Image: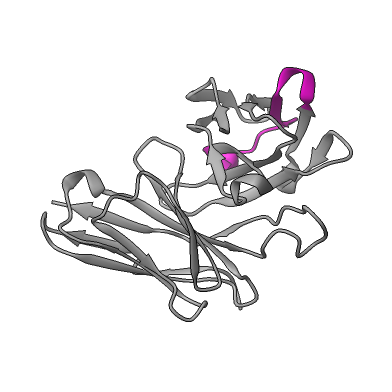
Amino acid sequence: AQSVTQPDIHITVSEGASLELRCNYSYGATPYLFWYVQSPGQGLQLLLKYFSGDTLVQGIKGFEAEFKRSQSSFNLRKPSVHWSDAAEYFCAVGAVAAGNKLTFGGGTRVLVKP
Amino acid sequence: DTGVSQNPRHKITKRGQNVTFRCDPISEHNRLYWYRQTLGQGPEFLTYFQNEAQLEKSRLLSDRFSAERPKGSFSTLEIQRTEQGDSAMYLCASSFPPGAGGPSSYNEQFFGPGTRLTVL
């Protein structure tokens, strides 16, 4: 069975500072990995995805993530945070063998200080 | 087609009432997924369809829940005899099926805005 852990429930960061959100997954085969962002009361927007190939993937809004198979991690980073990045971030894993359904982590809520 | 749409966006009901939500996927997408998200949690898978066939149901989907996709286009999710524990955001997503982009390919899901259910 797939599982995803996001160890940090809340992160507070100053505007302009860097941000890193952690994600660890458990899956027996090569996973398909995703980061989604959710603003209050809104649906999920895909930030980036990893299917195969280059382990450093670029996404929208200046985000990037690095897949590390040896650590079963897919951490999300942004070099300089903007106030509009305040939201909840979800890491998810999917697999063709599991019907492509997504298993999500519990989320990390990001607060941005001025 | 501008994306996945869900109606209503908000629903407030009294315990014991039945409610029905609708999801309209992206028109080219064969697959349609339902997820439930409770406050402070990540979304949890409920069920999914390929065209009109319901291929998998989660154990979270009790017998009070029923989902349909009669013509392989829009889908409905009905909850009978609602309970306060059913209060959540219900999210719908759609995608192409695996293989549409090549063997064993994974096709990303596009999410709708969700229906927020409050059971009083």
Q: Could you say where residue A41 lies in the image, as x and y percent from the top left? A: 41, 51
x%, y% of residue A34?
A: 66, 42
- Number of marks: 0
**Considering depth in this image, is B24 or B10 the residue closer to the camera?**
B24
Q: Look at the image and tell me in which quarter the N terminus of chain B lies.
A: bottom right
Q: Is residue B3 above or below residue B88?
A: below
Q: Can residue A18 be seen in this view?
A: no
Residue closer to the observer: A6 or B63: B63
Coordinates of residue B41 in the picture (x, y in percent): 41, 36
Compared with B31, A110 (above or below) is: above
- Residue at 75% x, 30% y is A79
- Residue at the image point whose x is 70% and y is 24% from the top: A73
In the rendered structure, which segment of residues is drawn in magenta?
A68-88
- Is A82 magenta? The answer is yes
Q: Is residue A27 above or below residue B94?
A: above
Residue B110 lies, in percent from the top left, at 60, 59
In the image, is residue B66 part of the stretch drawn in magenta? no
Q: Viewed as shown, does residue B103 lie left or right of A111?
A: right
**Left or right: B9, with B109 as reference point:** left
From this view, report whether residue A80 is shown above or below residue B36: above
Give the residue displayed 66% in from the left and 34% down from the top: A81
Given residues B100 and A82, the one toward you in this image is: B100
Instruction: Out of A19 and B39, give the one closest to the viewer.
Output: B39
Q: What kind of colouring is applied to the model shown?
A: one colour
